[in-house]
Image (cartoon, grey):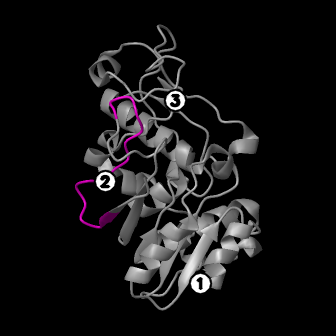
Amino acid sequence: MIEISKIHHWQENQALGNRLFKYCWAREIAEKKGFYLISDPIIGFPETYKILSGKKISENELIPGGAEQTQIFNMNDIYNHSGKILIHGYPQRYEYYAFNKNNILKWLTIENEELYDVPDEDDIVMHVRLSDYIIRQWNAPMEYFISVLRQEKYKNAYIVTEDPTNPEIQKLINFGCILKDNSRFGPVNGSMADFVFLKKAKKIIMSASTFSWWAAFLSEGIVYYPYINGLWSKSPGINDIDLRVLDDPRYRFVDLG
């Protein structure tokens, strides 16, 4: 049996990317081992509503990586463990997902995706993560988005953000960008509307955010990926987050220093 540790209800909207990492990693392990998977549904992704049946073993619990946040996991130990496995952390290294993309595309089919807005073929969409990222100094400067826009050809440049009233957004609006307002879908579905709008773009400018990482990974568009020291490093160590998608020519990497 594999269990995914719970995320507090007040975190659900902002933790979408982390939840997708946790679910896809746990499901791959469960399917490989033939284990029962216990997971709270992730709203908007109907495959996560289903029960994955299999062996139920509640004894001899293993927490991969321990209770600490780490990116070092011994996959052989996990695959060979005969007891319960509790997924506690957020595995954020591309190597855990790269080989399984075809399955992940099936697992993360979006519910009623056709009901959400879609950008035009020649539009570009940027995800601007601010709020808590400013405090942690993980936010990409507005100059990053503008520099990409200067080198690209597009009809409209749309902004998707969880912090639309932040004064930083005005810099992009002054440059001619359009703030995408999905509030009519409500707080939860509005977040999914943002996700779909980003995913459906033919050109995507990411923040160093798991939300935009998943939208880009599931997309077919060209992706601009920022290197930000302290979060998404250009040269990550073995225990660092490493979400660089180096085997896909869609990705363009921008070093922000």
**Residue to which mark 3 is pinned:** 89
Disc with the residue nearer the chain's start (3 vs 2): 3
Residue at the image position 67 percent from the left and 71 percent from the top: 169
Percent x, y of residue 106: 39, 56
**Residue to which mark 2 is pinned:** 245
Is 160 situated above or below 55?
Answer: below
Element marked by disc 1: loop
Where on the picture, by quarter, is residue 122? bottom left
Per the rendered image, the range of residues in magenta is 237-252
Look at the image and say whether residue 245 sits in the magenta stretch.
yes
Percent x, y of residue 78: 35, 21
Whether pointer 3 and pointer 1 mark residues with C-beta atoms closer than 8 Å, the reply is no
Percent x, y of residue 101: 31, 52
Mark 1 is on which residue type? Phe
Decide if residue 193 is in sight here.
Answer: no
Decide if residue 257 is in sight here.
Answer: yes
| Residue closest to the far front | 257
Label 3: how many residues lie within 10 Å, few (<14), some (14-19) or many (20+)?
A: many
Q: Nearer the viewer, residue 79 or 165?
A: 165
Percent x, y of residue 151: 38, 81
Disc with the residue nearer the chain's start (3 vs 1): 3
